[in-house]
Image (cartoon, grey):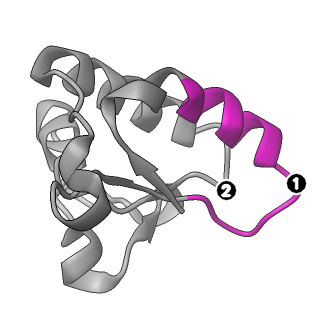
């Protein structure tokens, strides 16, 4: 699992590609601005939203890319798919278990 501050948004997708075939699942979490993370910056909202769209699209092709951040529900909703519980709802999700609200 990777914690995602502003400084490494660009590294996530290449890392996920390199982990394909080497691990069972890869997740990321947004930075919590407490403890050691208090001095780090969060990604900008527009940058993060674009990242989420790219991550979700890539997860359709890469089976190690798990879904954990509940803000991915914004992307799911835009695509007409049912939301999932995020990391507090069910501990994360593999893309293969995401269903449309009509299935």
17 w.r.t. 23: above or below: above
Marking on residue 41? none
Say if mark 2 contacts mark 1, CB within 8 Å.
yes
Residue 18 part of the magenta segment = yes
Left or right of residue 2: residue 93: left
Where is residue 36 shown, x and y percent of the image?
31, 60
- Disc 1 is placed on an element classified as loop
Left or right of residue 93: residue 71: left
Location of residue 18 by image quarter: top right
Q: Which residues are magenta?
A: 11-26
Q: Label 2: which residue? A: 64
Number of numbered markers: 2
User: Real-space Cα distance between discs 2 and 1?
Assistant: 8 Å
Name the residue nearer the viewer: 47 or 100: 47
- Disc 2 is placed on an element classified as loop
Q: Label 1: which residue? A: 21
Q: How many neighbours does mark 1 have within 10 angstroms: few (below 14), some (14-19), or many (20 or more)?
A: few
Residue 84 part of the magenta segment = no
23 w.r.t. 78: above or below: below
21 w.r.t. 85: above or below: above
Name the residue nearer the viewer: 28 or 41: 41
Name the residue nearer the viewer: 102 or 7: 7
Q: Earlier in the sequence, mark 2 or mark 1?
A: 1
Quarter of the picture holding the C terminus:
bottom left
């Amino acid at each position: 699992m990777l914690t995602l501050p502003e400084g490494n948004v660009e590294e996530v997708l290449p890392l996920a590609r390199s982990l394909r075939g080497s691990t069972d699942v890869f997740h990321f979490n947004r930075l919590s601005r407490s403890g050691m993370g208090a001095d780090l910056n969060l990604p900008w909202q527009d940058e993060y939203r674009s990242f989420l769209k790219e991550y979700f699209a890539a997860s359709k092709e890469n089976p190690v890319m798990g879904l954990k951040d509940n803000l991915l529900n914004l992307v799911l909703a835009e695509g007409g798919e049912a939301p999932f519980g995020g990391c507090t709802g069910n501990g994360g999700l593999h893309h293969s278990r995401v269903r449309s609200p009509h299935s």
